[in-house]
């Protein structure tokens, strides 16, 4: 049986073969996006290039937030205890941080586990929520 995947996302490994479009990922494009001067297609193209450029640091930050929350968050501790009573427990290995190509912050699949979209979760509080 094929391994299950989370629908509508494209998690990619760090250092994937994707290349950053340097004609899109520039300071001038950043300021145009910030000031609303890009059309929706150009903005999406810029955000995709930015996510690709920041993938490794985003994933590392997300994993650090995840690990800290598993150890120190009362909310996460409570939820993990309740899930463990209902069925198999949620461990660190079941929570994956990946870059997502869709506009979502995460997802769940009973076979895959929990997906955290590292490029859409810049803070520990958002990871906790």
Image (tube, grey):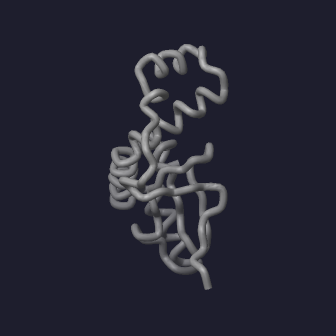
**The N terminus lies in quadrant:** bottom right
The residue at 43%/44% (across/down) is 19
Q: Residue at x 52, y 38 (%)?
A: 48
In the shown orientation, is residue 85 left or right of residue 96? right
**Residue 13 sits above or below residue 25 on the image:** below
Report whether 25 appears left or right of 6. left
Q: Residue at x 60, y 68 (%)?
A: 5
Above or below, comparing residue 88 to residue 112 in the picture? below
Residue drawn at the location 60% of the way across and 16% of the way down? 36
Q: Is 1 located above or below residue 66 in the figure? A: below
Question: 30 or 121: nearer the eye?
Answer: 30
Q: Position of residue 60 (x, y in %)?
A: 33, 51
Apparent side of residue 17 relative to residue 82 in the rendered image (left or right): left
Q: Position of residue 9 (x, y in %)?
A: 60, 55
Mark count:
0
Quadrant of the rendered structure where residue 14 is?
Answer: bottom left
Q: Nearer the viewer, residue 32 or 23?
A: 23
Q: Report which quarter residue 52 is drawn in.
A: top left
Residue 111 percent location from the top left of the image: 58, 75
Q: Nearer the viewer, residue 31 or 62?
A: 31
Q: Residue furthest bottom?
A: 1
């Amino acid at each position: 049986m094929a391994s299950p995947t989370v629908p509508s996302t494209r998690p990619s490994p760090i250092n994937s073969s994707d290349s950053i479009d340097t004609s899109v990922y520039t300071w001038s494009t950043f300021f145009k996006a910030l000031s609303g001067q890009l059309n929706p297609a150009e903005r999406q193209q810029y955000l995709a290039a930015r996510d690709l450029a920041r993938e490794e640091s985003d994933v590392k930050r997300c994993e650090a937030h995840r690990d800290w929350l598993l150890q120190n968050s009362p909310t996460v501790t409570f939820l993990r205890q309740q899930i463990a009573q209902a069925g198999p427990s949620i461990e660190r290995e079941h929570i994956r941080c990946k870059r997502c190509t869709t506009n979502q912050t995460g997802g769940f699949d009973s076979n895959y586990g929990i997906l955290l979209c590292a490029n859409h979760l810049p803070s520990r509080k958002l990871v906790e929520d």
